[in-house]
Image (spheres, rainbow, N blue to C red):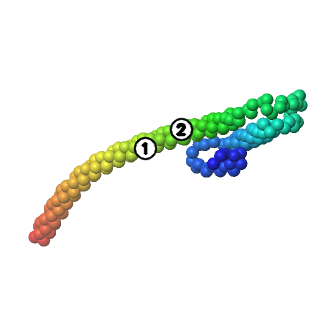
Amino acid sequence: MALTPEDVVTKQFQHVRFKEGFDPDEVDDFLDEIVVEWRKTIAENDELKAKLAAYESGETPAASSNDENVVEEVPAPVAAVEPAPAPASDPAPAAASAGIIELAQRLHDEHVAEGKAQRDKLISDAQAQAASIISEAEARGRDEVARLEAERVSLEGRISDLQQFEKDYRGQLRGFIESKLRDLDTTGVSAGA
C-alpha cells in the first residue's frame, strides 16, 4: 500500500506514560509541514505527467499560471521526433520521506534507549538505597538487642543483690526481734521474782 498525505494526517500514535517522548504538538506541526510539501510534490508530479502526456500525444500543453516567462514551443512533426522514454518517477520525495521517517525512528530509538538507561539507573539507585537502609536498620537492631541484653544482665544482677539483701535483712530482723523477746522474757521473769 502506497503511503499518502492523508495517511500521515490520520496516523494516530499511542501515548506512552511515565516515559519521555516527543512533544505531540511539535510532531503534529512537523507532520503538517511534510503533508503540505508532499501535496505540492504530488500536484507538481501530476502536472508534469499531464504535460508529458500532452506532449507525447502531439498537443501543445497549456501554459500554467506558474510559467509566466515560458515561450510556447511548437512541436516538430511527430514522425521526426523520437518518443521520449517515460521518465522514472522522481525518487526525491520518496527519499526525503524515507529520510524523515528514518530520522524519526532513530530519534525514537535513542529516546527509548535513554529512557531504558534512566529506568535502569533509577532501579539500581533505589536498590542500593534499599540495601543501605536495610543494613542500617539491621545494625541498629543488633545494637539495640545488645544494649537490652546488657541492661537485662545488669537488672538480673541488681535483682539478685536485692534478694540477697532481703534475705540478710530478714535474718537480721528475726535475730533482733528474737533477742528482744528473750530480753522481755528475762526482764519479766526477773521483775516477777
Drawn side of residue 70 relative to residue 24, left or right: right
Position of residue 64 measured from the top left corner of the image (x, y, whole percent): 86, 36
Q: Residues within 10 Å of mark 2 (few under 14, many from 20)?
A: some
In the displayed orientation, state which residue is furthest to the front.
79
- Position above or below: 156 against 55: below
Q: Nearer the viewer, residue 128 or 13?
A: 13
What residue appears at the point 69 percent right and 37 percent down from the top-left corner? 89
Position of residue 149 measured from the top left corner of the image (x, y, whole percent): 28, 49
Disc 2 vs disc 1: Cβ atoms closer than 8 Å? no
Drawn side of residue 155 relative to residue 99, left or right: left
Q: Residues within 10 Å of mark 1 (few under 14, many from 20)?
A: few
- Position above or below: 174 against 146: below
| Image-quadrant location for residue 98 | top right
Residue ID for mark 2: 114
Residue 42 appears in the rendering: yes
Drawn side of residue 174 relative to residue 153, left or right: left
| Image-quadrant location for residue 38 | top right
| Image-quadrant location for residue 83 | top right
Q: Nearer the viewer, residue 36 or 79?
A: 79
Amino acid at circle 1: Gln
Residue 40 appears in the rendering: no
Position of residue 155 measured from the top left corner of the image (x, y, whole percent): 27, 52
What residue appears at the point 44 percent right and 41 percent down from the top-left corner? 124
Q: Nearer the viewer, residue 29 or 72?
A: 72
Q: Nearer the viewer, residue 73 or 102?
A: 73
Q: Which mark is residue 188?
A: none
- Position above or below: 15 against 171: above
Residue ID for mark 1: 127
Mark 1: secondary structure = helix
